Image: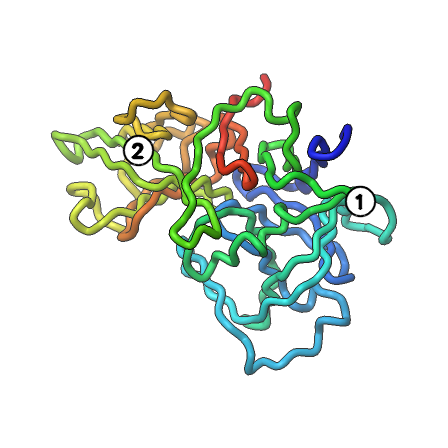
Amino acid sequence: MSGINELSYQVPFTSDSNLVSGLHVSAALGGGAPHAFLLDTGSVGILVPRSVLGPDYQQFDPSQDIEFQYASSGNKYCGQWVEVPVVLGVPADWDGTGDYPIADVEVFAVDRPAGFDGGVFGVGFGIGGLADGGPARNPLLHMSYQGERLKHGYIVSVQGVDVGLTTFNTEGFAFIALQRDISDEDWMQPFGSIDLSGDFSADGYYVDLPILMDTGIDDMILWVGADDAPPNLASNTAFPAGISVNLSAPPADSASEPVLQYSFMTGDIYQPMAPPQVEWRIGNGINTGINVLAGADYLYDAAGGRVGFRSPPA
């Protein structure tokens, strides 16, 4: 933490976090008590029960509620975007003292379903749809610490989240440059490729798709067009055991060296980066699932327009 643009803060995950149950961070929103949130690089914006916010945010007009919905699960929530201070990395018994990263951002206060008591800390980009609040609502892009703005970006590993990119914490990463979207307000997901082989098809299967590093789900989802569906494999159903899956980004048929590349066999529980299951649906993209972090740290540089991966320290 040496100076302007060289400042970072490592936020630890909660003690019960892991790649099976999810990676969670603790934060206090709007003067409320600390609450655990699932760190999700597959959505943008904080999803929080309204009851978790402080008393200043409990009066609202339910007729103004809108929807927030996740594509992978289909889960739908009704509530409102509310601007609150977000204090990140606080202990569960926080008494309001001490220095922690803080941002003033809009969060989605959930009013329905009434029993919702979870929380999602959405920090992705270029998601699209109702689960994309846009860069202005990505809390990690607006954090300050000890009066200094943390450089726009972060690193996710199994140990925690480094908020703010520095010369030191970005060492060892290989990068993929991103392209701006048509609105010029956000970055687009980079392309990767999936190569499948096995008894399901004599010719195998290969496709290039936008690749979304998604820590919010366990499984890998391939979103493909109806004309590009994997042969002899039912949609919305887990692939059978014995299919070889090879993922590469950039795509394996490009001239670029791979920045992320790994392989696994469906049903193989001994490959740490393998998701519990793989399925395909109609759409356009690859949701990796969280298990990529078993073999690679992940970096998003919103200021520089790039994502990166590196092998974690032994």
What crowding class fits label 1: few (fewer than 14 Cα within 10 Å), some (14-19), or many (20 or more)?
few
Residue 77, given in percent of the width and then of the height, sits at 51, 67
Query: Which residue type carries mark 2?
Result: Ser
N-terminal-most mark, 1 or 2: 1
Work out whether residue 84 or residue 289 is closer to the camera in this orientation and state it. Answer: 84
| Drawn side of residue 263 relative to residue 1, left or right | left
Query: Which residue type carries mark 1?
Result: Gly
Tell me which residue sits at (74%, 55%) in the image: 28
- The residue under label 1 is 147
Q: Secondary structure at mark 1?
A: loop
Work out whether residue 220 or residue 9 is closer to the camera in this orientation and state it. Answer: 9
- The residue under label 2 is 193
Question: Which label sits in the foreground, 1 or 2?
Answer: 1
What crowding class fits label 2: few (fewer than 14 Cα within 10 Å), some (14-19), or many (20 or more)?
many
Q: Secondary structure at mark 2?
A: strand
Image quadrant containing the C terminus: top right
